[in-house]
Image: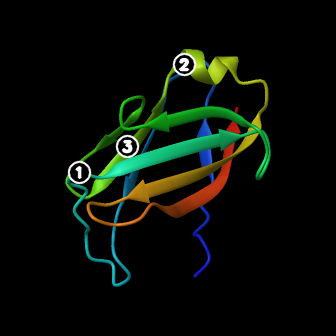
Amino acid sequence: MPTPIADLDAVRGTDFSEIITIANDVGAPVSTNNAEALFVLREYERGPVVLQKNNTSGISFGASNLEIRLTELELDALEYNTLHYDLFLKLNNDVKKKILRGKLEIE
């Protein structure tokens, strides 16, 4: 199955936050207990990495969701207005999987 695509929007001069709900194939919530996530921001698809976020630096978990946070300083330091991201998730006792990808548009 191809990785779902979702484009995200951010505004320079502000903090960015996006909450992603984690569900299984039939739409039921999935527990994020002991989960690990990695958000990779690139200049272009499969290009050089410009920023990464993980459980210790900008990703936090709720019962069945995760929140990605970029600070105002991090956004302002990015040289491009359009970047590409991949979001990986490793649930308890599972393998790491790419669960989402797309563009991050910065205004």
Q: Label 2 vs label 3: CA separation? A: 16 Å
Q: Which residue is mark 3?
A: 67
Image quarter where the C terminus lies is: top right
- Give SS at disc 1: loop
Amino acid found under the numbered disc labelled 1:
Asn
Residue 67 appears at what percent x and percent y?
37, 43
In the structure shown, which secondary structural element does the residue marked by tag 2 occupy? helix
Whole-angstrom CA distance, mark 3 to mark 1, is 15 Å
Q: Amino acid at mark 3?
A: Glu
- Comparing 85 with 6, the one in front is 85
Secondary element at tag 3: strand
Would you place residue 47 above or below residue 72 in this image? below
Circle nearer the N terminus (3, 1): 1
For marks 1 and 2, the one nearer the N-term is 1
Depth check: give the residue in front, 46 or 30: 46
Residue at (36, 31) in percent of width and height: 56
- Circle 2 residue: 72
Q: Is residue 79 above or below residue 101?
A: above
* Among the two numbered marks 2 and 3 on one chain, the one whose residue lies closer to the N terminus: 3
Look at mark 1 in the image and give the residue it sits on.
34
- The quarter of the rendered structure image containing the N terminus is bottom right
